[in-house]
Image (cartoon, grey):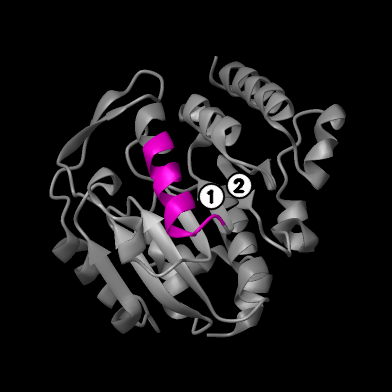
Amino acid sequence: MSEDRFAALDTRLFEFVPSSTTDDDRRSLLALHDSIAARGEFSYLEIGSHLGGSLQPALVDPRCVRVVSIDPRPQAQPDDRPHLGEVAYTGNSTARMLENLRGVPGADLSKLETVEESTENLEPDAFAPPDFCFIDGEHTNQAALRDARFCRAVMRGVGVIAFHDSYAVEEGVLTFLRETPRPHRAYSLRSSVLVVELGVERSPLDNPRVRGQLYRVRRSLAANRVGCDTALLRISMLARRARERRRSA
């Protein structure tokens, strides 16, 4: 697998298995992947894999040496996104996901570990520390906070966490940031990815592709280029929410 495809943010890396991510989400995730892979070999942990769509890049990139997928495989789960309430995941199973991933050219499933359990029932010390965590499980503030705490613990306080559909779980994210000791940094990427850096020496923002994905609602929020505190993040989230509402009106 050519590293150039990651540097080019080639969204075709996601094309073989369905995913709920938008093209901008995919470019944001690829930019983060590219920035972390530039440091050398890394490991990836994902919470909420469903069909396996967002696992594809990690499985085809030899620079990613270990992939962990945590998903309790509910057939339905609550959701804090507007007008949803509860979302059905009919036929949600690890076997189905693995069958999908076997069809991805170049995917190395030997480095994939699957865990059918909620993070609240797992011991972080039982896992090797990942460098990059992606949270895309139950879309409720309570679950997002629980999963973020697990990632912080399993990373031993150092690593990069990305939240999908962050607008739906912003209160959980803000609570997580308030309780997390510094150094940390948080910023939003297009279109719904929010990044939290925990104690990393080399920020993904050093990568021009990550900076290019920064979500700027107004020029005043260009401070995202150097990260933002919880107050600025709250302003950014509220402004983005207002913009999304205007688009859907």
Q: Residues within 10 Å of mark 1 (few under 14, many from 20)?
A: many
The answer to whether residue 8 shows anywhere in this view is no
Looking at the image, which residue sits at the far right?
A: 219
How far apart marks 1 and 2 lie (CA) works out to 4 Å
Q: Is residue 102 above or below residue 248?
A: below
Q: Is residue 13 above or below residue 182?
A: below
Extent of the magenta region: 145-157
Q: Main secondary structure of the magenta part?
A: helix
Q: Quadrant of residue 248?
A: top right
- How many numbered marks have been drawn onto this rendered protein structure? 2
Amino acid carrying mark 1 in the image? Ala
Q: Nearer the viewer, residue 15 or 58?
A: 58
Whether label 1 touches label 2, CB < 8 Å:
yes
**Residue 30 location (% of width, % of height):** 58, 63
Q: Which residue is mark 2?
A: 195
Residue at disc 2, secondary structure: strand
Q: Mark 1 = which residue?
A: 162
In percent of width and height, residue 55 lies at: 39, 64
Q: Residue 148: horizontal and vertical position, in percent?
A: 45, 43
Q: Is residue 248 above or below residue 162?
A: above
